[in-house]
């Protein structure tokens, strides 16, 4: 399967799967986020291990905090380092990447404003102990139990448009996450399988 292509989108129409599940919104290098999406969610702040305030969608944050608590009880450390970003913050980040590493690097590893999952509030970047990281660098039921998927797994660059990012988690809800993990597919592939519920796949 190749990258999902952008189709025609009517004004005010939400993204893939949005008619039935707002947590299945698809945002990638070819699918921009409808800013009206933010009207459908609640963003909440939380303090991370560095005493920084990180914001994320309500259920995304609650799921992560439960994951963090459960992992800590097993002696494993996981911390959130990035969550929701405004369009302005994303633009600034992209400019910094380009200034520090060049345009090609920025276009490979970064996202244009409006095309970043972080703008949905459903994506978080995490850091964790090496032992924990070895266990969850790709598809893994540990994350799925809490509703998260490994958004950019190794070997799926041609589908997601991004190199592997073991730190980037995306909340889709437990049911969807467990199915995606079991089938070893990306969100793009999962939504294509659910094409009857999608609105503008080509």
Image (cartoon, grey):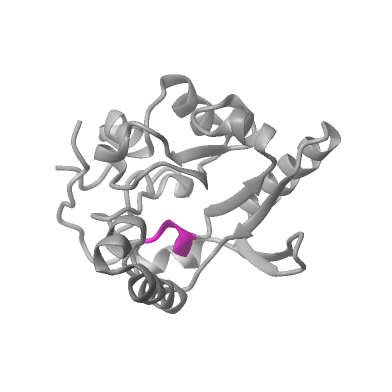
Look at the image and give the residue range highlighted in magenta: 116-120
- The residue under the point 45% across, 28% down is 180
Residue closest to the eye, 21 or 32: 32
Question: Camera-side residue: 130 or 43?
Answer: 130
Q: Quadrant of the N terminus?
A: top left
From what the image shows, is residue 85 above or below residue 150? below
Q: Given the current orientation, which residue lies at the most extreme front position?
A: 101
Q: Is residue 112 rendered magenta in the image?
A: no
Name which residue lies at 70% across and 41% down.
129
Q: Residue 49's quadrant in the figure?
A: bottom right
Q: Is residue 29 above or below residue 133?
A: below
Whether residue 73 is visible: yes
Quadrant containing the C terminus in the rendered view: top left
Q: Position of residue 171 (x, y in %)?
A: 54, 45
- For the view shown, which residue lies furthest in the top direction? 182
Quadrant for residue 41, please give it.
bottom right
Task: Where is residue 174? Give x, y as percent.
Answer: 58, 33
Q: Is residue 162 above or below residue 188?
A: below
């Amino acid at each position: 399967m190749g990258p999902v292509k952008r189709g025609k989108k009517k004004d005010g129409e939400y993204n893939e799967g949005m008619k039935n599940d707002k947590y299945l919104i698809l945002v990638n290098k070819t699918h921009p986020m409808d800013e009206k999406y933010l009207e459908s969610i609640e963003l909440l702040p939380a303090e991370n291990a560095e005493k920084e305030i990180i914001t994320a969608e309500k259920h995304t944050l609650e799921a992560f905090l439960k994951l963090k608590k459960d992992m800590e009880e097993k002696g494993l450390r996981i911390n959130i380092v990035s969550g929701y970003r405004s369009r302005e913050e994303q633009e600034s980040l992209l400019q910094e990447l380009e200034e520090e590493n060049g345009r090609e690097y920025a276009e490979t590893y970064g996202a244009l404003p409006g095309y970043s999952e972080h703008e949905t509030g459903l994506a978080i970047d995490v850091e964790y102990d090496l032992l924990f990281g070895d266990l969850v660098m790709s598809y893994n039921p540990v994350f799925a139990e809490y509703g998260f998927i490994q958004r950019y797994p190794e070997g799926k660059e041609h589908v997601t448009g991004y190199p592997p990012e073991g730190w980037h988690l995306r909340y889709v809800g437990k049911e969807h996450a467990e199915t995606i993990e079991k089938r070893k597919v990306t969100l793009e592939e999962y939504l294509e399988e659910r094409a009857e519920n999608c609105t503008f796949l080509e």
